[in-house]
Amino acid sequence: MMLDREQIETALRQKNCAYKLCCLEQTDSTNADARRAAVQGAEHGLVITAETQSAGRGRRGRSWVSPAGENLYFSLLLFPEFAQEKAQMLTLTAALAVAQAIREYGIDARIKWPNDVVADGRKLCGILTELGWRPDGRYFVIVGIGINVNQQQFPEEISQTAGSLCLQSQKNMDRSKLLAAVLSAFSSCYGRFCAQQDMSGLMEEYEAILVNRGRQVRVLDPKGEWTGTAQGINSRGELLVCREDLTVEAVYAGEVSVRGIYGYV
Ligand code: BTN
């Protein structure tokens, strides 16, 4: 069954969330669609979903395999009022919203900094945030979200690290209901982010479900890798990592990524 646009819109109206939905059967990438729509005059709050993507994009130039009808693939178009340097923090904001929506289903979803949503060490969701500019110079943000919902089998390369909501809960999920829950959670998190224009209003909730917190992480810095203990985040969304000599370093997601020392988390 395809996503039910009316059901999603009704649920969102009840929660006072103003999004405009565009539900596609197939596309290359919903992030690419959102970019095209933004340039052609689409407005803040557009959400483009697809049942399948032929060229789904992941972070760091990777692809996002997007089998039809099983999962959620969607992109949110935003025209923020704040300076564009702050926009990367929306990735963390979106991760928090997705994790909170999944937790409503009784699944212990957590965040692997900066923006993977995981459960039992397996990745349930990936987020790709991209910037763009309209011909009039106004910048926009595309938050692209892929959630593994009802997928039960994964390609060999990711079979050890990928999971899905269905595998976690042993139940098939209603994707329309889940999308409404994610968009509603995002409205709330986005509002609180905009109020402070940083992570300070969301930090406590983010850290409460940050899987890296208190754990050893390997910081994959192109200038040299090192190991430390993750403590939490600061208001800029950087990961605070304590080195062996007890100095604390703020690690920026645009430059480095982290890995658990025993595997993916
Ligand atoms: C990651 O590598 O973890 C990020 C994956 C983001 C995938 C989503 S699916 C919907 C949207 N459209 C894309 O092409 N990518 C994002």
Image: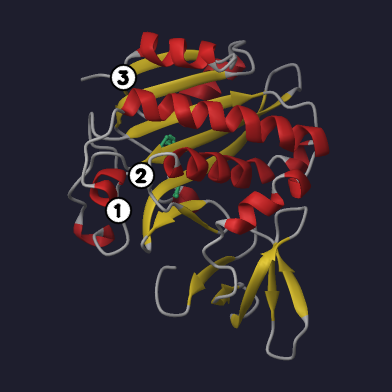
Disc number placed over residue 64 in the picture, else none: 2
Residue nearer the viewer, 31 or 183? 183
Residue at 52% x, 13% y is 14
> In 3D space, how far apart are the residues under numbered discs 1 and 2 (Cα atoms)?
14 Å
**The N terminus - image quarter:** top left
> In 3D space, how far apart are the residues under numbered discs 3 and 2 (Cα atoms)?
20 Å
Amino acid type for the residue under numbered disc 1? Gly
Residue at 64% x, 50% y is 205
Residue located beneath label 3 in the image: 3
SS state under label 3: loop
Image coordinates for residue 65, horizontal then vertical, percent: 29, 43
Q: Residues within 10 Å of mark 1 (few under 14, many from 20)?
A: many
Where residue 247 sits, quadrant-wise, is bottom right
Q: Is residue 259 visible?
A: yes
Residue located beneath label 1 in the image: 163
Q: Is residue 29 visible?
A: no
